[in-house]
Amino acid sequence: MTGRRRTFPRSTFLPRSFRFTRAVRAAALSAACASLAVGCGVLPGTSGGSGDDPIVVMTWAPEGTSATNKPGMPAFASTYARWVNAHGGLNGRQLKVLTCNDHNDTVSAAKCARRAVKENAVAVVGSYSQHSDAFFPYLEGDGIAYIGGYGVTNAEFTSPLSYPVNGGQPSLLAGLGKELASTCGPVTLVRPDTLAGDALPTMLNAGLKAGGHHAAEDQRAPEDSTEYATQSEAALENSTGSKSGTGAGSRDGKGCVVPALGDRTSTFMDSFRRARTDYPAVNTATVLGSVDQTVVDAAGGGSGPYEGSYVTGWYPVASDPAWAPMKKVISEQAFSDTRIDAGDTGVQTTWIAYNAFRQAVESLAGGEVTSRSVRGALDKGLKIDTGGLTPPLRWQFTDRLASIGFPRLVNADVTLQAVQKGRLVAAKQGFVDVTKTLEQADVN
């Protein structure tokens, strides 16, 4: 399975009156069991242990699938554990990282979560999965925190057990839309025809609307296709005005095509490069995670289709000095593991997530490390310092974006990058906060 729609609802955005049903139910169950201490079996949040036993966590991501893969995330998690243990562990205890392949399907995602529960993991850290409906019930049932997910599903910004370190796809697309609004004619978004993909147009359009631009054309595409000739031609027709009525009311300027297909973005661009010769010139733009420096290089660098493109990301460019500590871990412990790339957004997210987890454990000052104590440290307002890679992180359930259904989204900062002479460089210094843009998103 690749996350293609079967019996799922049309949109991942639920009506406001129903948005928090599962989250509230999980919180109520936990509170009831804690107060009664009878009839509930094992209380949620008691996995883990103390003493000299290793601290157990899990990292999962899809590997070897026909859709998006993130092998660098579990690979880096294992590398981080080796590095931590070589430097005395966490509060003197060894860190044990379990890794799991979610295979981009619901069955495997659920198996990963069940294994985390069975092996007494105190947290799931720095992971990627599109199948939050499959894994969150198990984590919530056992009180296991989900720290630093990739931000690809809405549940990561609603579950009380989720502690996201970035603004996910919503922030990236809102920031990109706001930037493109002033320069683009008709805009076409090419995105996966999946449940997770259904949320993307809303966020891109929020950014476009903030800049006074009309909504983008929503172009669905198979997530696991080996070619995108049909979708490329449709996107070009939409963005060049060749399709009757497209772009009406948009400001003047070249049309813009925004592919956001994860690992399949490069496949789309191969088809797009061949198709675009028969159409007027258009610009391209995308988000990190769909493209990085290796993708730009493989597409021809400065002579490729990404030249001049805007790319929004969550973090500073890979050459920023703030990444030096992560690169030191890689150089010391990754050895020749080719899955780990310091410029990979998944690896970067895992690094930040493990630093958040480390600070939570250290705040316990040698006390018991369990799923409950880790959550308690984070829920009591612990401020996480990421060394300038993000603003300081602190999670509260009712944050500013709760009004649009994202109560756990605490970091809506994005960076704006551009491809210049074949290199991804900072197009603007520092971060751009898109909180106000997201607050205006039409999620109904």
Image (spheres, rainbow, N blue to C red):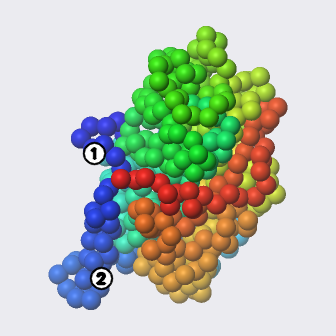
Could you tell me which secondary element the residue under label 2 belongs to?
Answer: helix
Determine the residue positioned at 61% across, 38% down: 286
Left or right position of 145 against 35? right
Determine the residue positioned at 57% across, 62% down: 435
- Residue type of the residue flagged with mark 2: Ala
The residue carrying mark 1 is 9
Q: Which residue is more in the foreground, 65 or 249?
A: 249
Residue at the far left: name it. 39
Q: Quadrant of residue 360?
A: bottom right
In the displayed structure, 426 sits above or below 138; it is above
Could you tell me which secondary element the residue under label 1 belongs to?
Answer: loop
- Residue type of the residue flagged with mark 1: Pro
For label 2, the crowd category at 10 Å Cα-Cα, with few meaning under 14, some 14 to 19 and many 20 or more, is some
Determine the residue positioned at 30% across, 82% down: 31
| Residue 175 percent coordinates (x, y) | 61, 50
In the displayed structure, 194 sits above or below 347; it is above
The residue carrying mark 2 is 31
Task: Give the quadrant of the N terminus.
Answer: top left
> In this view of the protein, can residue 216 be seen by the observer?
yes
Of the two numbered discs 1 and 2 on the same chain, state the one appearing first in sequence: 1
